[in-house]
Image (tube, helix red, strand yellow):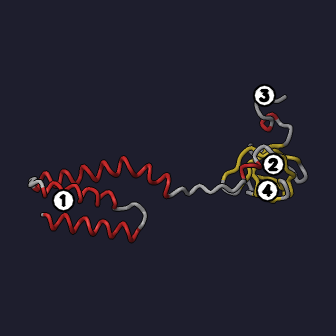
Amino acid sequence: MSLFWLAALVLFGLAEAVTVGLTSIWFAAGALAALLATALNASVLIQIVVFLAVSFVALLLVRPLAQRFINDRHVATNADRVIGQEGVVTEAIDNLSARGQVNVSGALWTARSQGDAPIPKGAVVRVLRIEGVKLYVVPAGSPASVPDGEP
């Protein structure tokens, strides 16, 4: 069984080196623990239990921490700075026909109305949120566009 666990350790290690995505390192840790159990003359059943237990615990404890540092897919774009700003409607906003465009700080954005009410071209709007590449807006001065605590 020593050769089996050693081969498993090498294969899981190679698979991890090829994928570099934290896909099999947990099993390599389990195979190493099972190899140590073999060195201590543990039965095959105990070796398998040690392999499964160590692999599972390594997955549960280490993966969330590792993912935070390795695969941080959140890319800051400074797009959030348009939230709360005012812009001018350059193409009438109509949610039903999926049309609308707003100019905010010199940048053109696809826009949708927060409610389903159309907003005409030339109207001044306030940005409430961003979803994907769309701004959700309301007419400036409407109750939904005034932040809490302001008159």
Report the number of numbered marks.
4
Q: Where is residue 40 in the image (x, y as percent from the top left)?
A: 11, 53
The quadrant holding residue 28 is bottom left
Give whichever of 82, 47 is nearer the camera: 47
Is disc 3 in contact with disc 1, using a CB cutoff of under 8 Å? no
Q: What residue type is labelled 2?
A: Pro
Residue depicted at x 40% and y 52%: 63
Q: How crowded is mark 4: few (under 14 residues within 10 Å), some or many (20 or more)?
A: many
The nearer-to-camera label among 3 and 1 is: 1
Distance of label 1 from label 2 (alpha carbons) = 68 Å
Is disc 3 in contact with disc 2, using a CB cutoff of under 8 Å? no
The residue carrying mark 2 is 118
The residue carrying mark 1 is 35
- SS at badge 1: helix
Q: Residues within 10 Å of mark 1 (few under 14, many from 20)?
A: many
**Is residue 92 in sight in this rendering?**
no
Is disc 4 in contact with disc 1, using a CB cutoff of under 8 Å? no
- SS at badge 3: loop
Residue depicted at x 13% and y 57%: 38
The residue carrying mark 3 is 149
Q: Position of residue 3 (x, y in %)?
A: 15, 68
Give whichever of 37, 113 is nearer the camera: 37
Distance of label 3 from label 2 (alpha carbons) = 27 Å
**Which mark sits nearer the N-terminus, 4 or 1?**
1
**Which mark sits nearer the N-terminus, 3 or 2?**
2
**Which mark sits nearer the N-terminus, 4 or 3?**
4
Residue depicted at x 73% and y 57%: 98
Q: What residue type is labelled 1?
A: Leu
Q: What residue type is labelled 3?
A: Gly
